[in-house]
Image (tube, rainbow, N blue to C red):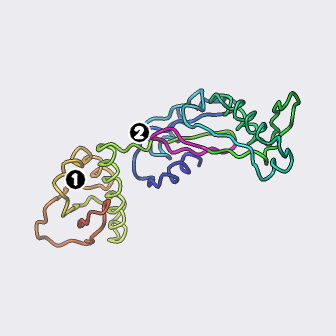
Amino acid sequence: SIGLGARGSANIKVRQPLAKALAYVADGRAELSPELADVVRDELNVKELEFVADEAALVTYRVVPDGRQLGPRFGPRFPRVRSALTAATAEPADAAAIVRRVRAGAHVELVIDGETESITPEEIIVHTQPAEGLAVVNDRGVTVAVDTTITPALRAEGLVRDLVRQVQTLRKEADYRLDERITVGVFGLSADTRAAMTPFRPYLCDETLCTNLLLEDDGGAWDRRETVKLEGEAVEVAVRR
């Protein structure tokens, strides 16, 4: 669910395959059985799942004191509070450690003018910056990032997955049997899109039980035929027995 939230934050639909998901687990339990790893990869529609030992590989944090709360509390000493917190979070690992304490509801101890002061989680503001090319979500000590770089091959695979969904909808509307073999027509593809999708033709046929895929209309009758959008490109999709 955290990984799906990361995808959603980048506005990438689940049918679009991505290269990789990366995860950091705060308590160190960064292992999954091969079967569960397969489930995660399938649900997130990613090619690889990788656990990282350092949260800094996924995100950087800027931790600042909440002036509205700490200003009245410390008065003229507030700039020293800000300086102490800046020093305590200068290293990415230190910043991540303080963020974990804040998220766990624990106080943060700062040395100010030689005295130890306890700062509550509510008095600290955390600004999050994902690493370049990643979309990141954190919840309950787990940080998950997805690689948002969509290569031409990944884009083409996403188009085919979207096309499979469209064909499956037409199959249902035509009331075909689940095991019924069909002919599929896809008309109006641009030359570039057609070329990009060619390697995934067997996948499309396997998923839709298509024994004959037509990219040019042969003038025959179709049981169902509709115009759909594939990433903004209008194409016609048709099915028949």
Extent of the magenta region: 128-140
Residue 19: give its label. Answer: 2
Image x and y of residue 160, in percent: 31, 53
Image x and y of residue 137, in percent: 59, 46
- What amino acid is labelled 2 in the image? Ala
Other-residue count near label 1 (Cα within 10 Å), few / some / many at <14 / 14–19 / ≥20: some
Residue 161: give its label. Answer: none
Residue 239 in sight here: no
Answer with the quarter of the image where residue 98 lies. Answer: top right
Kindly indicate whether the residue at mark 1 contacts the one at mark 2 (C-beta within 8 angstroms): no
Q: How many marks?
A: 2
Residue drawn at 30 percent across, 63 percent down: 232
Q: Secondary structure at mark 2?
A: strand
Other-residue count near label 2 (Cα within 10 Å), few / some / many at <14 / 14–19 / ≥20: some
* 140 relative to 37 in the view: left or right: right
Answer with the quarter of the image where residue 151 lies. Answer: top left
Residue with the mark numbered 1: 193
Residue 25 among those drawn in magenta: no
The dominant secondary structure in magenta is strand
Residue drawn at 41 percent across, 39 percent down: 19
The earlier-in-sequence mark between 2 and 1 is 2
Q: Secondary structure at mark 1?
A: helix
Image x and y of residue 131, in percent: 51, 38
